[in-house]
Amino acid sequence: MVLANPTGTMTAQAANSDSWSTADSAALYGIDRWGDPYFSVGPRGHVIVQPRGERGGSLDLVELVKELQGRDLSLPQLIRFDDILEDRLERLHAAFERAITQYGYAGRYQGVFPVKCNQQRHVVEQLVESGRRWHFGLEAGSKAELLIALSLLDDPEALLICNGYKDIRYIETAILARRLGRRPVLVIEQADEVERIISASRELGAAPYIGIRARLSTRSTGRWGSSVGERAKFGLSIPDLLATVEALRQAGLLEDLRLLHFHVGSQINDIAVLKDALQEAGQIYVELTRLGAPMGYLDVGGGLGIDYDGSRTATAASTNYSLQNYANDVVATIRECCEPHGVTVPTLVSESGRAIASHFSVLVFDVLGAGALPGAVPAAAEQEPLILRNLRDTHAGLMALADDDAQLPERLQEAWNDALKFKEDALAAFRLGYLSLPQRAVAEQLTWACCQAIAARLQRMPTDTALPEEIQALPAALAGTYYANLSVFRSAPDTWAIDQLFPILPIHRLGEKPARLGSFADLTCDSDGKFARFIDPVGRSGRGQAKPLLELHALRPGEPYWIGLFLGGAYQEVMGNLHNLFGSTNAVHIRLGESGRYRIDHVVRGDTNAEVLQAMEHDPQLLLERLRLASEAAIGRGSLAIGDARRLMAHLRASLEQTTYLQDGSGETAAL
Ligand SMILES: *Cc1c(COP(=O)(O)O)cnc(C)c1O
């Protein structure tokens, strides 16, 4: 028998549920780690949002959701806290300012936001507005993003970094934008782009600001490791880089080469990777000035990571550095590269997307119901077969065990072995025709009742009790599926596509012990439509690991159960898709007002069914008309009553105008 020390799961959280506090919930879900300083647990067991961080002001997320529902904004809701977006910008700039002072850096920092991270109009507008005081700019990776950046970025000093594949029209647009009084930098990412830039400049008699993206040899780790290194998709190899400089010189455009760019990939987990890249890029920068380019900017790309699980480790859902560590390393390393060569230090540019946009949006969804295993003990029939009586005796024996029995772990194991054996017997008897279907059902119910009796017992045991592994795993076997009113593919696609972890937790009842284990299934009919990996801040699998089940509360009939998905503001909503035709959710922009009250700046209604149908080229009116004709025919045949036909058409018409999510019961859960 293997003995292991249980930690982490519900068995270990507290010796008994009466002693559960909101602080226990904060620790269990790690909110005091990844949520700091924006999210915490309040005394009422609700998630509290401090949109301005330590600068004061807070609101109760549960009350907010209720009030939004009162405005007919049903769940799921995406709540965007624009104050958080602004606070993240401030933190980024403050970190670079501190580093610049600390290392006596003779240059400055001027960042841009990569639009691909969240192209939503209100989000980009808010960033441009909040970033004005730092001349914060934008980065575009396609023509459509360039259009957004050009029209929204009206600060002549802010940088507009133009990345991605570029055809002549893209290039000419950037050149003309410089004439317009903007500051676009065309970053050469592919060797053949330089020829197009040269010919477009001749054609227009004007040149753009030019940047070069270097393909570094630095090896990265983690998910995006392949976006650097010699085989990366973007960036010039050193021979290509030299050839490009030569081509620019011959075309008389070397004067316009101002920026060196590199990008190590998103979510850099390990700061050592960044340091190597910075050193390599710093040396290339120095060499470019030696080749006669005026330069002036070094763009360190994106990659600044988020500590999704609060573990501070170099694992996929975390980082082993802070924002300040990051800024310090950028500033110090580049200074170290330039100073010995007497090269003026560049203005430092970063393209941090994830680090700016992750925190500000919270997705709140409701649970429609939960599938749980039956735990009740069925009444005994007369003349019950021996197999069933054996199971009943096992259950009764379990219930009779004393809490202070010194041999308790062994006795639980023994009882569980018995229960499993009797259940096997019951199945064999059923296969041979000796047990009826209702009798087999009783056998299964009794087995689950034994399992629950053991799980309940485990909860009362001291947390340091050594337990057989099989017994430890029992609560997980009892885990339920919580049916979530959302589409994973629409609202958190990275959980499906790349196993990304986001903090997920109930936003209320946090003063109450979450006595169940569960995972979530979404509304799509896709078996991948689920959340079944969770951050594990206090886990037994070690820091930075994921767990397959989340501690949740038992549903109460008629009461809503609301879950929040946090840190999903970057990439998720814009990469989400229409799988099963679930469209965008309702979204609101919240600002904290002077009085401590919040203000709703924008309401963006979720897609209606009519809108998602149109996105697939269907004409909703035509669909209705076809069904009207079909119901006329059915009325004619006498198979459909006129009143029923009217009811059917009314349902269809109403559905077209509604969002694609479930609305019945206004978020109340079904009984277990
Ligand atoms: C995606 C991307 C970014 C943003 O990366 P984050 O990790 O979100 O900061 C920045 N620059 C380039 C070139 C990118 O492709």
Image (cartoon, rainbow, N blue to C red):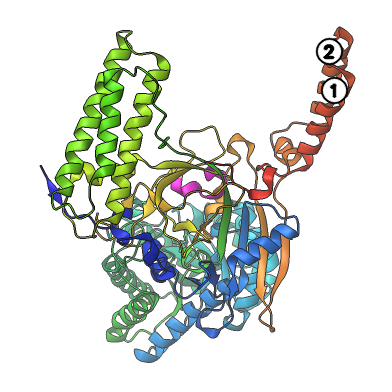
Closer to the camera, 261 or 368? 368
Determine whether 641 is above or below 57 in the image. Answer: above
Give the image location of residue 405, x and y in percent.
Answer: 17, 52
131 relative to 325 in the view: left or right: right
**Where is 74 relative to 354, above or below?**
above
Give the extent of the magenta segment.
487-495
Q: Residue at x 42, y 18 (%)?
A: 438
Going 58% across and 37% down the picture, which residue do you hit?
579
- Answer yes or no: disc 1 within 8 Å of ligand 1: no
**Residue visible at 63% across and 68% down?**
206
How many numbered discs?
Answer: 2
Q: Is residue 383 visible?
A: yes
Q: Position of residue 302 (x, y in %)?
A: 44, 65
Do the residues under discs 1 and 2 have CB atoms within 8 angstroms?
yes
User: As shown in the figure, which amino acid type bears the numbered disc 2?
Assistant: Ala
Q: CA distance from mark 1 to mark 2?
A: 9 Å
Q: Position of residue 402 (x, y in %)?
A: 22, 50
Instruction: Locate residue 603: give its quadrant.
Output: bottom right
Labelled disc at residue 634: 2
Q: Amino acid at mark 1?
A: Ala
Quadrant in which the N terminus appears = top left
Ranked by sequence position, the earlier of labels 1 and 2 is 2
Q: Nearer the viewer, residue 509 or 391?
A: 391
| Most common secondary structure along the magenta stretch | helix
Disc 1, SS: helix
Q: Which residue sits furthest left?
A: 1
Q: Secondary structure at mark 2?
A: helix
* Residue 176 seen: no
According to the image, label 1 marks what residue? 645
